[in-house]
Each structure stands twice: as C-alpha cells, then as structure tokens.
Image (cartoon, grey):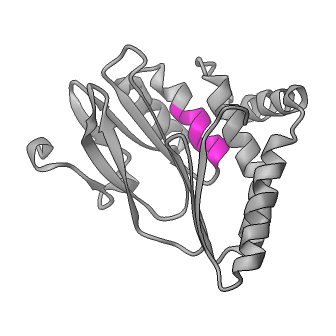
Amino acid sequence: MVGSTVSVAAWSKDTIALETAIARLRDSTRSIDSVAVGAAVREAWAAERGDLSPRLEWRDVLDAYVLDRGLPVLAAAADSALIDLGGLFLWVGPATRRSVGIADPGSALEPVAGVELHAGAISTVSGRGERRAVTVLASSAFKAAAWASALFSLGCDQTMVQAARRRITVVCADSAGVRWSPELQSRVVLPPGRVP
C-alpha cells in the first residue's frame, strides 16, 4: 500500500492490545511482495468476475486486497473499527448503521446521496472524466473496490443490469439521477434537492 493513506478509528477495552494490533496492521501492509500480491489479485478477480472483462484501476484493488489480508490482526483486538482507505470504508465489528456520503461527480463538496453501511465495505469510484459515481457495498474491501472500479467503466444503465445479474449491491449516480439495488431501498438517502 505504498503511498496510500489509511485512517483507522478503532474501539476496545484493551487499548494496549488495540495499539499493538493497529501497528501490526500497518506493518503487514508495508511488508508485501507486490509481484505475489498482484498475481493473487488477478487470480481472485478472474474467479470473481466470471465472463465480464471490464477495465480496472489495479492500484486501488491491490490496496483493498492487502487491507483485507491484514484485517484479522485488527479484528482480533478491536471491539469495532472503521477503516478509511482513500474513500473505501471498511467496518469491523457488530452490525452498525453508519451513513457514508457519495460525492457528486461534478462537485466533490456536494453529496449526491448517502447510504447506510451495516457491515463489510463500501467503495465509490467517480469522476475520471465522467459525471458518474458508482458505489458498491460488499463483504470485503477487495470485492467492493474491484466491482466499483469494474462497473464504473460500464455506465449506470449497464451497471444496474450487471449488478442485478451478479447480485452486487450498488448505487449509481449520473446525469439521469441516482439509482440503487432493491436491497438498499430503505438505506439510501437523497439530499432534499435530489428527491424524485
């Protein structure tokens, strides 16, 4: 995770064990063999994507994969934790109801929507020359980051089709509006000016 910023907010009754676990998480993400991790990520993605072969931002996906591999160290010491890896959020602990904002692809300071994270990870890909944002909720940082990157390249119409077909939980925003998977019906909140 060279050059990536990771923020960790963690809670535990044993602060010394928690501090040690955070240091071990940090150390585990620094001491990786990037060639071996790259090969493992490509293999994992091939198994996950099936017959779909979209474009990915590999650096983001690699970092998420490395984070997933180091996570058990933190999970063993923390009662709960929220990890932020450059906009990818990962929750460790019992179910929660944390709201995560999705920035408007045309104005990063304005939210296009908010979605409740109950468990696992949430990753948003936006911009890249397009006025579109794709947010994926998944059980792991790797799956959230990989699918957000992959689906972004398809556009919102195809994103919604592929998400339904593959049972991926997604929110997609573009000039046509904000759309989401049916299972998010009570978990997506639109700002007052965006409510249909």
The location of residue 85, given as percent across then percent down, is 58, 44
158 to 30, vertically: above or below: above
Tell me if residue 171 comes above or below residue 76 in the rendering: above
Q: Nearer the viewer, residue 67 or 177?
A: 67
Q: Is residue 88 visible?
A: yes
* Residue name at image x 41 percent, y 68 percent: 97
Question: Could you tell me residue 6's position as x and y percent?
Answer: 61, 47
The quarter of the rendered structure image containing the N terminus is top right
Where in the figure is residue 155, as x and y percent of width and height? 39, 21
Report whether 53 appears left or right of 99.
right
Q: Quadrant of residue 61?
A: top right
Which residue appears at 27% of the width and 37% of the height? 109
The residue range painted magenta reads 141-148
Q: Please, which residue is most extreme toward the bottom here?
A: 13
Q: How many numbered discs sit on the rendered protein?
A: 0
Q: Is residue 34 magenta?
A: no
User: Is residue 51 visible in this depiction of the protein?
Assistant: no
